[in-house]
Amino acid sequence: MSESVKIISPVDGSVYAERPVARDADIEAAVSSARAALPAWRAVSVAERARYVLAFLDALLAMNDDVTVELAWQMGRPVRYGGEKGGVEERVRAMAVLAEEVLRPYYPPEKAGFRRYIVHEPVGLVMVIAPWNYPYLTAINTIVPGLLAGNAIILKHAAQTLLVGERLAEAFRQAGLPKGLFHNLVLSHQQTEKLIGSGRIDHINFTGSVAGGRAIERAAAGTFASIGLELGGKDPAYVRADAKLDHAIENLVDGAFYNSGQCCCGVERIYVDARVLDDFVTGFADLTRKYVVGNPLDASTTLGPMARGSFADTVRSQIEEARRKGATALINMKVPGNRPGSPYLAPEVLTNVNHQMEVMREESFGPVVGIMKVHDDDEAVTLMNDSPYGLTASIWTRDADRAAEIGAQIETGTVYMNRCDYLDPHLVWTGVKDTGRGAALSKYGFDALTQPKSFHLRDV
């Protein structure tokens, strides 16, 4: 009997969909057809590639009503939020525009008797290993610029969101993308590692856990494939005494609890100046209590279940450990089904926390946030940097110059002022420390997907 992958819905624990794992022959056919399609695609202009990508976007947006419901069933995001339509459209259009500029040849200053320039050639076959938490956005980050740069794509999507790969494949089919350039494969972990280690993949992009990133690096060892990794995060926020508190509260509550806290750049720890701590905590807790936890298919639900019960249990464990060590839980919301093993978990706000508690050090990836008092900028910077991760950090202040000075001291890939939990496609998306390596989006996102080639032509 052939192996299959099941999507166990967090809504009710049912099997929402089941798909067979690809056969060896399917994998071989995908790699071979992708390689065969590359020469012709490489000869297509960037403008023409962009037309295919924008047609793909139109096809995908037309599916959005169905996609939104599928996402609720697959990973629990409430239907009221409309899927990932806005972010997908913004990123696809931005990358299509950037490609025309970024992929032009570079000409150094003229030198008599010589013609010199550098072109950006595609790396070849790109493998995207996408996660379930933002299953369209994270995949798009590499798929779209990868195709715009002239590459072919193999997508291995997370088991929890397998239907996303099928939707993407169908949108490319409707867009008329030449055959062989995009393949959606259902792979086991063993098959994934074998394909990565085969030497037939030129670039791998993985979004997931630190342990998963290490497994990718081990599998690719010796192949000389380039690797992009977006791994863990424990993103901090710092609320200064001069912050506009109502704005900070509204945005940080959303930044901590949107998508049930299952966001790569979600806010997981907040440091607040002692002078405004009480007002901030009161407002933050009051707004958090307004969440409605329940079935994501219900339009009144604002916080759905986590993707799996085991993920919710990790957060429950962190909350319990923090309380044993002296933390105060402010919300204590009663939610039907909120019990060990259940993906339904109410949001929680913890005060009296410190860095001896897991909830302030280890990734939670769920609806919990700790709020800690600080006395000045130096203390806040020290605490924000006291983490093995470095994806984003946000500073809440009316002083942009001081925010930039503080941001320069923070060990992170992105610094925000007065916003959080957002990717601007014109800015590079990257991280430091155990958050990973490489870059996505912006003009720099094309670097890993292209190979520079110099032409040095001499007249005689």
Image (tube, helix red, strand yellow):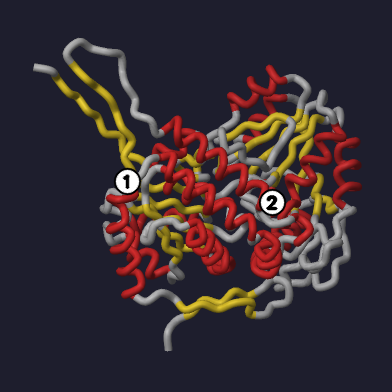
Residue situated furthest bottom in the rendering: 1
Relative to 129, residue 285 above or below: above
For the residue pair 180 and 238, the one nearer the viewer reads as 180
Residue plotted at (42% across, 84% down)? 2
Residue 390 rendering spot, x and y as whole percentages: 56, 39
Looking at the rendering, in which quadrant would you find the C terminus? top left
Q: Which mark is residue 20?
A: none
- Which residue was labeled with disc 1? 42
Q: Amino acid at mark 1?
A: Arg
Horizontal and vertical percent for residue 26? 35, 73
Residue 161 located left or right of residue 454: right
Looking at marks 1 and 2 on the same chain, the residue that comes earlier in the sequence is marked by 1
Q: Which residue is rendered at x = 52% and y = 55% of the image?
A: 208
Q: Decide: few, some or many residues near mark 1? Use Cα within 10 Å; few <14, some 14-19, many ≥20.
A: some
Q: Can residue 86 be seen by looking at this rendering?
A: yes
- How many marks the image carries: the answer is 2
Q: Secondary structure at mark 1?
A: helix
Q: Amino acid at mark 2?
A: Val
Nearest to the observer: residue 39 or residue 362: 39
- According to the picture, the residue beneath numbered tag 2 turns out to be 359
With respect to residue 249, does 329 lie above or below?
Answer: below
Identify the residue shown where x is 31% and y is 75%: 25
Binning the other alpha carbons within 10 Å of mark 2 as few (below 14), some (14 to 19) or many (20 upward) gives many
Q: Residue furthest left?
A: 460
Name the quadrant of the N terminus. bottom left
Position of residue 150 in the picture relative to residue 400 (left or right): left
Q: Quadrant of residue 365?
A: bottom right
Instruction: Write down the quadrant of residue 401 in the picture.
Output: top right
Q: Position of residue 107 (x, y in %)?
A: 32, 21
Is residue 430 in sight in this rendering? no
